[in-house]
Amino acid sequence: MSHPRWLFVSALLLCVKLCFSVEPIVIVHGGAGTVSSDRVPGKLRGVSTAAQVGYQVLAGNGSVLDAVIEAIRVMEVDSYFNAGYGSVLNIEGDVEMDASIMDGRNRATGALSGIRDLLHPIRLARAIMDHSGHNFLVGEGLQAFATERGFTFLEPPGQLVTQYAKDALEAWKASDRSERLGEGGTVGAVAMDVYGNIAAATSTGGTTGKRVGRVGDTPIIGSGTFADNRLGGLSVTGDGDIIMKVCLAYDVLRTAQLTGSPVQQTADQLLEEMGTSFGGTGGLVGVDTAGEPVVAHNTVHMSWAYQRGSTIAYGANKEDFNILPPPTVTGQQVHADF
């Protein structure tokens, strides 16, 4: 027979959950830039699927960290995105990828840069956060850590290179090489669970024609990724060399806190200022502390999607706000009419 004290404690905990819980949400982006009309549908399908897969993790009592990882894994295997398979190529025609993840409960982070021939860099970023004793790994030490943790690299090398990425590199070489962004494609995800815990993560192949060893904003905490339960969470995409100069992810969330302004309004304002002051283009998605979605970009396109409850929303340009029917889940697969 249960002791009355434990019955009281259980009832109190239940009350706390009911009174202070928020509606879970997973929001993702598929990169900011200018996308040709024939590729927009593929990007929208990809981000919509990713958001639903991430949300199913939360619906199954999974953590926000697992939710953002699973959402990003969907996009890392989709050639419509500049992450994992489909990453853009550096000047030598190779794929070098960056990724990061952050836990909003304690600001734990894991980041990496320059990894090659690994299908899911975001999983390695999580391992760095959990098992390395550090925040950021690169070079030989990153490779050794990945091997130590049992990650498998693709053999033979070069299997992440797509024909689309090859063609983009050749077009870039034939141009005046001033175009740094193209259609974007960097992927990111932010999640909040019923208790208000937040996680954010970002994964990318960088920019077409970049120098070997170039690092963008994606693995830089505070620039490309940031999460704090007291501030919110953001994943950023765009011109990384400029985004790093303004520490965009942290600046948006901290400015919103200090001014008392909505995160959405602050994001729009600071993106506009970044464009005016530095000529930088980009975008972001995220959630504020109330679990409200944030979508902002100063580019022509940024594919994005979120699921909150039975609502699945998505878009590509500034005027887009579309709603999908509730998904049907069969085993591990999520289906929705598109």
Image (tube, grey):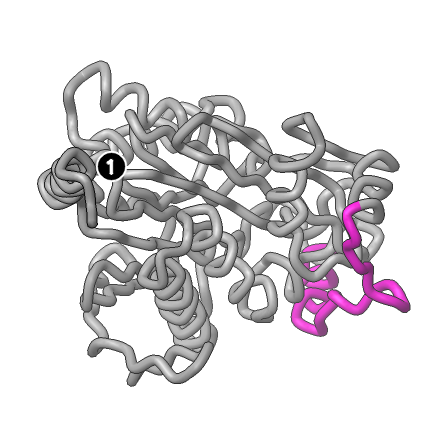
> Mark 1 is on which residue type?
Asp
Q: Which of the pair 329/234 is nearer the observer?
A: 329
Residue 238 drawn at (x, y percent): 48, 43
Quarter location, residue 276: top left
Give me the residue at 33% from left, 54% from top. 26
Residue 137, above or below 307: above
Crowd class of label 1 (few under 14; some 14 to 19; many from 20; radius 10 Å): many
Give me the residue at 23% from left, 59% from top. 308
Counting the numbered discs, the total is 1
Which range of residues does the magenta coloring cover? 149-173
Quarter location, residue 145: top right
Residue 149 drawn at (x, y percent): 77, 47
Question: Which residue is farthest front?
Answer: 1
Give me the residue at 30% from left, 82% from top. 328
| Element under disc 1 | loop
Q: Which of the pair 41/64 is nearer the observer?
A: 64
Give me the residue at 83% from left, 45% from top. 148
Q: Which of the pair 302/273 is nearer the observer?
A: 302
333 is within the stretch colored magenta: no
Q: Is residue 8 at least partly visible in the picture?
A: yes
For label 1, the residue is 288
Residue 90 drawn at (x, y percent): 75, 50
Residue 107, above or below 6: above
Quadrant where the C terminus sits is: bottom left
151 is within the stretch colored magenta: yes
Q: Is residue 241 at least partly visible in the picture?
A: no
Residue 235 drawn at (x, y percent): 43, 42
Residue 21 located left or right of residue 116: left
Residue 64 located left or right of residue 153: left
